Amino acid sequence: MALSGLDPIRIQVAAGAFASICEEMGAALIRSAHSANIKERRDCSAAIFDPSGEMVMQAEHIPVHLGSMPASVRAVIDREHRQGVSWFLNDPYAGGTHLPDITVVTPAFDATGSLIGFAANRAHHADVGGSRPGSMPADSTRLSDEGVVISPRVLDEASITEVTSRMRQPAQRRADLRAQIAANRLGTTRLAGLADRRGNSDLHLAMAEVIEYAEVRTRALIKEMPDGEHSAQDVLEGRLGDIRLAVTATVTGDSIRFDFSDSSGPDPGNLNCPLAVTESACYFAVRVLTDPDIPASAGAYRPIEVIAPKGSLLNAQAPSAVVAGNVETSSRVADICLMAFGRAAGQGTMNNLTLGNDRFTYYETMGGGQAASPGSAGPSAVHVAMSNTLNTPIEAMEIEFPLLAHEYSVRRDSGGGGQHRGGEGLVREIEALEPMSFALLTERRRHRPPGASGGGAGKCGRNLLSRATQAGYTELEPKDSGDLETGDRLRIETPGGGGFGNG
Amino acid sequence: MAEREQADVILGVDVGGTFTDAVVITDGQVFASKSASTPEDQSVGALTAASEALALAGTDAAQVLVFAHGMTVATNALLEARVADAALVATRGFADLVEIGRQNRPSLYRLEDAPAAALIPPERRFELDERMGPNGLIKAPSIEDLDRVVEAIKQSGVGSVAVCLLHADRFPEHEIALGNRLRERLGRQVHVSLSHEVVGTFREYERAATTEVDAALSPLLSSYLSRLGGRCAGKGLPEPLIMQSSGGLTNLETASRHAALAVLSGPAGGAAAAAMISEAAGEPDLLCFDMGGTSCDVCVIEAGRARETGGRSIAGRPLALPMVDIETVGAGGGSIAWRDAGGALRVGPQSAGAEPGPACYGKGGILPTVTDAHLSLGRLGDRPQLAGGIHLDREAGRAAISALAEELGIDDEVCAAGILKVADTEMVRALRVMTVERGLDPADFALLAFGGAGPLHAASIADELGIERVLVPADGGVFSALGLAAAERRQDEIRTVLMSEEETSPTRLAELIGAADEVSWDIRYRGQSFELPVSTTSTDPKRLRELFEASHEARYGYRDSEAPIELVTVRRRHVTPGPQISLVEQDFPPKNGPESIDLGQATLFLPEGWSASGDRAGLIRMTRVKSL
């Protein structure tokens, strides 16, 4: 499909310039933020928008932010915008995803004072005042258990002080929010520079062209996929039992619809997803199935329709708890979207582990087996779907926390067999050196990640507890929490990925 | 600090992908020669080039006081994973550290992309039943277990061993015990790399991966250097000094022992040259831009010194060692232009490389490249051939551009200009991100452009970045070799100290600094997982705190006078300055753009609005005449 009068050189130059702005914002945020979550794990994203709130370009470091930034800008688009006045929010039901992700939106103006767009960035804060340190509680049932809810509001010194005073480590929260403001300031300055050099109308044209271009490329690739209906079902491993996940993906010409109407109703726990998170998982699957280099703009998502009944698991409504929806359910939604198109499933979980007491909080996610692809084996011991954060080094963990590691190894023979083998999971075993509590948010402990086209399933993960006072290990639930005494050990064995093709 | 050397004849030899360059400096005069690189044994080409340069200078090997050498032996071996069979010994339970890495995947959406595979496979990873903790001994290894591991390694028949035990950076006793036993039982022909000697800082994966690289490359590098040393002795040349990734020279023996220190030997020569140029040209702050056929290396000179980093990834593997801070962008003269599914003109990341190369090389390439675009716009002037004797097939180059123009529905000339514009956009984007990541503004710098394609893009990139001044070495080949000859000798030692403020005292600090010429501390507030470097030889704890807090405030916008600080790492450096070299002004008549200027190995394109004139140290200085 040819472009309707778009200039092939101008588009690419404009796309490069917008991408550069987003990448610079991301680099500035990572460089100037204070918490390890942003600096070291890079749990953040940056994007620019046109004056109507359409996303022009995004630089995401983790895929779960893909579809959820536009909702944040939509949440403030109708407010009155002034030079230098930013907005911030984290309310999953008004532009957010889960509470630790705080988004800052800043309007951009040209020299004459006309609105030329928005800069926005999102960062995962180390704490937002939830019921447990780290604000990733395994047992939350209402949004208010998970921390301070920020409805879209003006970000100034007064609001920063008011909000951060209700969170742990308020000095660090303030520093991270200031880093977010500084990153947006860089973005708006760059946009104003473009408007200054190219003229306002040229800038708007370039924004519109980049959005249209992403749409044309996405449609061209979807069109190559055969028309038809594909479906897949699976279950989430809820506290009270399995929760149904089902998708029907329909390719019609150059568009795709993902319909989750057959998925479960709301979860009484915290596995619920706001629609923006469900959309992110669908966009992730489409990028995997088409071309990851298509600019992440509103145009790339126009050919994709996502249907989930209001109030259900995948289109959660207030006041449902959502913290695990972002980290766990989102990965499993991405799984079934890919499974519908004949792909094997990866480990499907981030294996979230939180340990802590009055003195410290330690939060870790663990890699596992990637699914085998139609052409190659699945990589081992990596993050597989909606996350891609780094681990905490064993030495750093032991220096900082009262913990001792006994094993960190590749879990051999856990990947599914087949023409191409699924990736291997890993093993991390940790001993508590003083009394503390633990919380686990994990998946694929009861149901194996399936292979595809005859490939075998990966092994289930296992959460094991060994008491200092007893020999042997007892198996814990996929979502579990409790107390550890000195000398008790937790052993996490993460799932293998599904294989592909008859071996 | 040691005295500056008074050298009569200085020799520098730089081995590149295609050519090996040698310079001889005597009485401030530079004599250069170039010969084909010899990839099978780089020392052959190095000695050939050296002999020719000495002959040109009318002197001989016996007069040479200093011979400095930069090479790509270790880099190439690592990029091609062509390494020695090695074994790894780790703490029990942790043999897979080198495979797990930091558990992130290299590409978010290409699920089949795997992280770089460990150089040492699972069957050659052995575990020692020992444990150090953050406060020292938890479990000592038994004699029986040490013997068991040594015997297993002997049976595996490897020529090299990497040892990385947890917390060995601060408590190396078990590594030392195992190292001694390995050397006793396996003899000197087996290389042993101990993590606390190679790296000396905490974070086990980065330390283990660096030690793994060191063990897997050292046998190769050491046999290359011993061949080179032999050839030099045969010719009557002094023992060569080897350029390390840090940008300083070291002796042959140290370089042979730790190959991990020489992985960026080649590019570091370019950075050393840039630092020398910076002084000679009176431009203390330079953004250096080395664009070749397939990629473009960028580094920063600040206040006359190449910016360094404590570590970076090469070929997907972290190397936790001090090195010149060089970033590589996948854009070069061979980058292929194409039309994507959305109808846009794209350039790269695919490259035609050297074989078949751009269409205009006439070696069978039919896809249009950046070089073909320059050619069809007349930017290569009327030269019949490029460096390396490549004859230009103008017809083939134009035909390739024409085919793409037709596909895009635009004029040939618009297409060629578009290719250059898009390629510039990609490079500018990479340069901007690289500078923002380091807290720098490119507009504060002068641009130093070299490499086969650098001088063609210098002016347009300077325009995009708001840079006013551009320097181009008249002969890019001589440039790197010259940098080697002028480089300083360095020895770095890095140790984790992890010391609280209460434990510091002037006496303790003085002990840690020892006789070092330069000292840098990595300091953090307690509880932070990131440190800031503070350079000072002061032994006053209050001064350290003040410098750290000022740096923290500059970077994060606040200081916390109540919070205790921790000294995490000390970096000590011993320095012997390189020889003083005074160079004569470049003889180059002033020119105004637009004009293409043949520099022999490269072409300089001076667009309208720019002028050029000769400058010191073999440089051409370009200045923007019209403001943007």
Image (spheres, grey):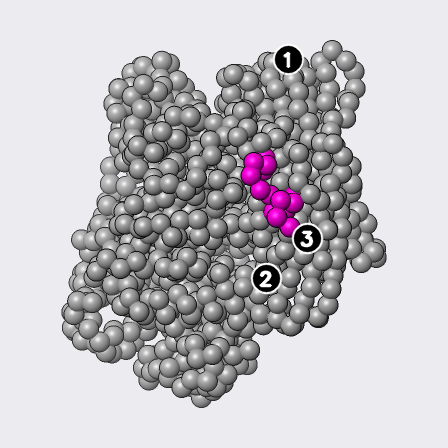
Which corner quadrant of the image does residue B161 belong to? top right
Amino acid at circle 3: Phe
* Magenta-drawn segment: A309-323
- Determine whether the residue tagged by mark 1 lies in a helix, strand or loop: loop
Q: Which of marks 3 and 2 is in front?
A: 3
* Residue at mark 1: A486
Q: Kindly state the secondary structure of the residue where label 3 is placed.
A: loop
Badge 3, how many Cα within 10 Å: few under 14, some, many 20+? many
> Which numbered circle lies on residue A304?
2
In three-dimensional space, the C-alpha distance between marks 3 and 2, rounded to whole angstroms, equals: 13 Å
User: Residue at coordinates 44% horizontally, 25% vertically from top-left?
Assistant: A168
Q: Tag 1 or tag 3, which sits nearer the N-term?
A: 3
Which amino acid type is shown beneath numbered disc 2? Answer: Ile
Please give the chain letter of the residue carrying mark 2: A
- On the picture, is A261 further left or further right than A186? right
Q: Where is residue B172 in the image (x, y as percent from the top left)?
A: 54, 23
Q: Which residue is drawn at 47% across and 27% down?
A: A129
